Image (spheres, rainbow, N blue to C red):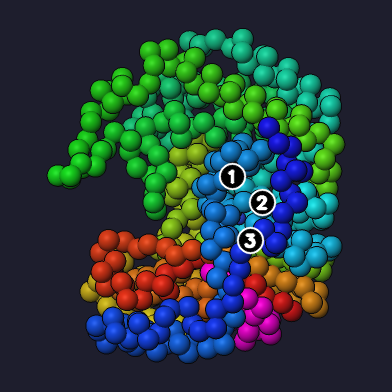
Amino acid sequence: MEPIETYAVNYFNDFELSVVNEPIGDQLLLFDKITSNVQSEQFEIFKKIEKNAPFINAGSFSNQVHFQNAYQAPVQRWFPYREGYSTRLVNAFIKELKITGNIFDPFSGSGTTLLASRHNNLNSFGIDVNPISVLVAKAENESYSIIEINNLQDEIEKLKTVSRSKDVFQTSFDLADKVFNSEILQTLLQLKFHIKDIQNQKIQNLLFVAWLSIIGDVSNIKKEGNGIKYKNRKRTPSGYINIEKEVWEKQAFPEDKFNFVKTKLLKQLEIILLDIKSNYGLCEKQPIILQGSCLEFDNYFSDEIQFTFFSPPYCNCFDYFEIHKVDLWLGDFVKDKEEFRLLRNTGFRSNTNSLNHKPIIYKNEHLENLISLFDSEKLWNKRIPSVVRGYFDDTHTLLSKLYKQTVKGGNVGIVVGNSAYSGVIIPSDAIIADIAREIGFKVKNIFVTRHLTTSSQQKQELEPLKNYLRESIVLLEK
Ligand SMILES: C[S@@+](CC[C@H](N)C(=O)[O-])C[C@H]1O[C@@H](n2cnc3c(N)ncnc32)[C@H](O)[C@@H]1O
C-alpha cells in the first residue's frame, strides 16, 4: 500500500488539456438539430453567457472530479463520501498555481482539499454544515502520535473481546426498524455505546468514523441517485418488486449477525490503523475545520486566502441531509425532526428542502431569461424557480466574501455540474463565471471535465443541447 505522500506528486503535466475556441457545443451542427423554440432560445442565451468564456477540454480530469478513485485511496477510504473528489485533483492545482499561502474549502465535506493541502505542507481551513462531514474531515486530518497509535491498537484488541449484550438498546430514529434487521440494529447500537465510552476523544472519533462507515453495508438501504433506496426493492423489466423484508434479510446477511457487524467494524479499523501507521510523521500541518455555513465563513476566519478550492452542492435538488439521514439519526447527530429540519435549513439553497425564506437579492439577467423558459406544468416541484434563484444568490454572497478575503493574484477553483429542469439547462459553470466576473475576478479557465446525463424524461428533449450538460472546474483569479 502506498503512503499518501507518494501519490501527491502529479500535477497538470499529467493531464491532457486543449483550448476550445468556440462555445463548447458545435454550433453549426447544433443548429440543424434544434427542433423547438425553447431550444433555440436557450441556445441564444448560452451564446451570450459563454461569449469569450475560456473553455478548456479537460477530459483527463474526468476521473478526478468524483469519489471513484478515492474509495481505495489511503485515508479517504475511511469513510465512503460519495460526493467527494480526489486529492490528486487538488494537488494538480496547488502545484500548477504554485500555491504557498493559506488554502480554504467552504464546502469541506470529507476534507479532501485539506488533505491535499497538508500533503503540500500548507495551512488550510474548511467549513461544512454537516456534522458527519466535519467529524470525518477532522479524523482524516489529525496527526496521531505513537502513544495514540498504541491506544488505537489497544481499543481494537478490546473490541475483539466484546460479546453480545442482553441489554436492549434504544434509538430515537423512527425508521430504524425498517432500515435494519433487528439483531443488526441492536449490534450497531451496542457497539456505538461501547465506542462512546472511550475516554480519548481522538481515538473515540476514529472508532466512530469506522462505525459510521459500515452502516451502509449492514443496513437494508443504499445511497443511490438523489436519496436512499431499499435494497429489497428490485427493478425488473416489468416494474419494481418488493421482496419481503425478512426473506431478503435471510438471503443478505449471515446467521451470526453480531459477529457479522463486529467483523466489518474491525476490518475497517485495521485499514485505518494501517493508514495511520504508514503515514506516521508525514502531514504534520493541522487544518482548522468547523461546522457552520460557508456563507458566514468570515465570522470564523479572518486570515488572507491564497487559494480556495471546492465543490458546492450542485443546482440539481440533491439533498445532502437526505442522503446522510440514516447516519445522522443513528449516530445521534440529530435527535428529533425539528433538529433535522433546522440542520437542513443551514444548507446552501440547492434543493427544495433548503429554502429558508431568505430574500433573493442578487439578480442575473441570463439566469432570469432561462428561468422564464421553464414550463411550470413540467416542473416536478413549483419551488424550483426559487431553488435556482436562491442557489445563485448564495453563490453571489459566497464569491463576494471570497473576493474580499483573497490576496491579489490569488485563485479560486470551483468544481460544479450543470443541471436541467423541464427541458431547460442551467449552465452553472458559465453563470458562476459570469457572477465572478461581475464581482471583479478574472475568469482564467473553465475546464470541461465530463458530460453528464439527465433524467430519462428530459433526455430526448435535451438531445441537441446535451453538450451543455457538463461538469467543469471554473478557475478564477483576483
Ligand atoms: C460536493 S460536497 C463537497 C465534497 C468535498 N469536496 C469532498 O471531497 O469531500 C458539498 C458539501 O457542501 C456541504 N454544504 C451544503 N451547504 C453548505 C453550507 N451552506 N455551508 C457549508 N457547507 C455546505 C455539504 O454538507 C457537502 O458536504
Query: What is the magenta range?
Result: 435-448
Q: Position of residue 132 (x, y in %)?
A: 58, 44
Q: Nearer the viewer, mark 1 or mark 3?
A: 3
Ligand 1 falls in quadrant: bottom right
Q: Secondary structure at mark 2?
A: helix
Q: Which residue is mark 3?
A: 15
Quadrant location, the C terminus: bottom right
Amino acid found under the numbered disc labelled 1 = Ala
Q: Nearer the viewer, residue 467 or 455?
A: 467
- Left or right of 9 on screen, residue 265: left
Q: Is residue 199 magenta?
A: no
Residue name at image x 50 percent, y 39 percent: 327
| Within-10-Å neighbours for mark 3: few <14, some 14–19, many 20+ | few
For marks 3 and 2, the one nearer the N-term is 3
Q: Position of residue 120 (x, y in %)?
A: 80, 53
Residue name at image x 81 percent, y 44 percent: 283
Q: Which residue is mark 1?
A: 70
Q: Which residue is mark 2?
A: 87
- Left or right of 475 on screen, residue 34: left
Check the image and report above or below for 300 versus 166. below
Q: Secondary structure at mark 1?
A: helix
Real-space Cα separation, disc 2 to disc 1, in angstroms: 8 Å
The answer to whether mark 1 is within 8 Å of ligand 1 is: yes
For marks 2 and 1, the one nearer the N-term is 1
Check the image and report above or below for 318 versus 382. above
Quadrant location, the N terminus: top right
Residue name at image x 55 percent, y 34 percent: 212
Check the image and report above or below for 456 versus 468. above
Real-space Cα separation, disc 1 to disc 3, in angstroms: 18 Å
